[in-house]
Amino acid sequence: MRSKFVLLSVLFCSVFVWNIEATAEVPFHIGIMTGTVSQSEDELRGAELLIQKYGNAAEGGMITHITYPDHFMSEMETTIGQLLGLADDPQMKVIVVNAAVPGTTEAFRRIREKRPDILLFAGSSHEDPAVITAAADKAISKDNISRGYTIPLGAKKMGAKTFVHISFPRHMSYEMLGRRRAIMEVVCKDLGLQFVFETAPDPTSDVGVAGAQQFILENVPTWLEKYGKDTAFFCTNDAHTEPLLKRIAELGGYFVEADSPSPLMGYPGALGVDLAKEKGDWPAILKKVEEAVVKAGGGERMGTWVYSYGYTNSAAMAEFGKRIVEGKAKLDSMKDLIACYDDLTPGAKWNASYYTDAGTGVSNKKMVLVRQDTYVFGKGYLGVADVEVPEKYFQISR
């Protein structure tokens, strides 16, 4: 009996000491807020990668992960409150929000007042560049200015004659998205493509995600009949992507890349692809999704980025913050920032540039725009990443 007691005591002490050591080994915490699986799965999976790599702060690790509400437009105070809660942790040194939904700027402003020592990073901001960068240390988004040119160009290369842009008023009120749409319309005219704008329900409205997705499922057949099968479709909302891909694979049309490009964005759900065994293995994910796309008849008609933008953005921003706190990177170094993206995406080539205001022509070095080349399933890379975007398109405002 005594030997059992001694053994249990030793085991208890060992676990206790291990927990103290584990906590001692983590000198600071990183907080990351993403959407839920239903709104933005890739961003959430990027946060899970961080937890896998650096441990959960609640268990002695480095990462604290929270999610913003699906109905974030009507629950802005909830988002703000959650972010302020991260800053209450005295060990918190980096906070990342991806995507930076409305309310992020206000939360960052309040955090800055009480915790100026915390690095604040915003990914894919829903708020205008001048607004978010007034509060964030760094904002990183897809290069929607250049993509306003490269996506219609990709559609043309794939064989499209009509380009249908699907969105809704809230998204079109955002500077980056509204400006990209305006650029796309001019580019389509210059390339000889018919440009069409179609309005779909906002998933944050009363219809919810399910209602918005049902609208896409019901309307794509009508649009294909109206505009023809040589039509390329693009939507600004992640929730619209899966039903759009499903119908394009079944009925025809083209899809260059998603608003947040990734092999995981819409394809697994649309085509019934089980990627449980391939989790985190991007070459294997691409191969399996490509096989499914080709089998479904979407070969040479549907594309993506090889590595997920949302996934990489979540993980890379947090890694960048970690390296800055550790003295291994500098906040104002583009090279140090992109190194974090490169390390997460072997073989991928990232193009990066600072955001330039269309009205003033002034570059904002707090906002970095990134992009990859488009990969067409069953065909290969389109070669649009290295295309030089004509200067005149950078002058177009929304």
Image (cartoon, helix red, strand yellow):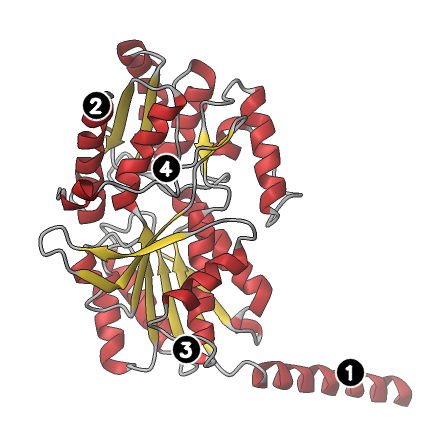
Q: Nearer the viewer, mark 4 or mark 2?
A: 2
Q: Nearer the viewer, mark 3 or mark 2?
A: 2
Q: Quadrant of the C terminus?
A: top left
Earlier along the polypeptide chain: callout 4 or callout 3? 3
Earlier along the polypeptide chain: callout 4 or callout 2? 2
Q: Identify residue type, mark 4.
A: Ala
The residue wearing badge 2 is 196
The residue wearing badge 1 is 11
- In the rendered view, does 172 fall on the left or right side of 326? left
Q: Visible in this render: residue 142? A: yes
Q: Nearer the viewer, mark 1 or mark 4?
A: 4
Earlier along the polypeptide chain: callout 3 or callout 1? 1
In the image, is residue 292 above or below residue 205? Answer: above
Q: Identify residue type, mark 2.
A: Val
The residue wearing badge 4 is 239
Q: Which quadrant of the figure has residue 385? A: top left
